[in-house]
Image (cartoon, helix red, strand yellow):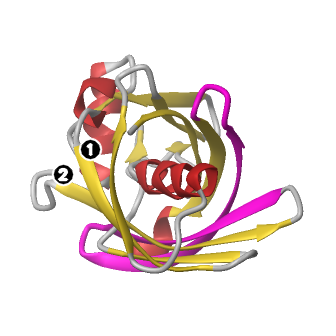
Amino acid sequence: MKAYKIIVVVLVFLSFGFTFSTKTKVKITSKSEITIHGKSNVNSFKCKYNSNFLEDEILVTVLKNNESKMSFANAKIAIKSKGFDCSSKMITKDFKTILKAEDFDNINIELKELDLNGTAITTRLLIEIAGKTKEYLIPMAFNAKNNNVKGTLKLNIKDFDLKCPKKVFGLIEVDDNVDINFNLFLQY
C-alpha cells in the first residue's frame, strides 16, 4: 500500500548515495499503481488504490548509510482506507468493512531500514492497519533509469485482527491471505 512510498524513498536514497542524517523530499507520482489481490472459495478479486492520493511529498531522514544498510526516521506515509476500488460496489464495500475504514481513516506505513545484499533489496516496514502494527520484510526491485520501485507484500489479515465477511449464509468465504502489489514511480 503506502508502504510502497516508503520503499520508493529508500530507493531514491540508494541512487544518490546519501550519508549520515540526510533529509530529502520524495514524491510518488500518480503514474504509480497499488493493487490488492485476494480470492474466495468461488472467485478472485482485485482492488486498486486511487493513484491521485499518492501525490503527497514525504520528507525523509536517513540516519545511517553504510555499504549494506540504511536506517530511516520519520519516513511515514498514510494510505486512505477508503481509497480502494474493487470494480464491484459490493466487493468494495466489503473490503472497506474488512479494513474498518469507518473507524480508521488511514493505513500507516513507516520505513525503518533498507538492506542491500548484492542485487537483492529488502525493506523493513512497520504497517498499521485498524490500530494494529506489524513489522514486515519486503523484497523489491528498483530501476534507477526511470525511478521505479516494484514489489509484493504478502500478508494475512488476521495479523491485524481483521475478519473477512462470509456471504450467502457462509457458503462463500474470502481467503485471509492477500498480495499487495506496488509499482511506484518517484520524483525528487
Q: Mark 1 sits on what residue?
A: 96
Q: Secondary structure at mark 1?
A: helix
Q: Are marks 2 and 1 in contact (CB under 8 Å)?
A: yes
Tag of residue 101: 2
Residue 114: give x, y in percent of width and height.
61, 70
Q: Amino acid at mark 2?
A: Ala
> Is residue 127 in view?
yes
Left or right: residue 183 compared with residue 95? right
Label 2, secondary structure: give it.
loop
Compared to 54, does 86 lie above or below?
A: above
Of residues 80 and 158, which is closer to you in this image? Answer: 80
Q: Residue furthest right?
A: 118
Coordinates of residue 19 in the picture (x, y in percent): 53, 73
Report the front residue among 86 and 175.
86
For image coordinates 24% across by 44% down, the residue present is 57
For image coordinates 63% across by 57% down, the residue present is 154
The picture places residue 177, in percent across and down from the top left corner, at 60, 56
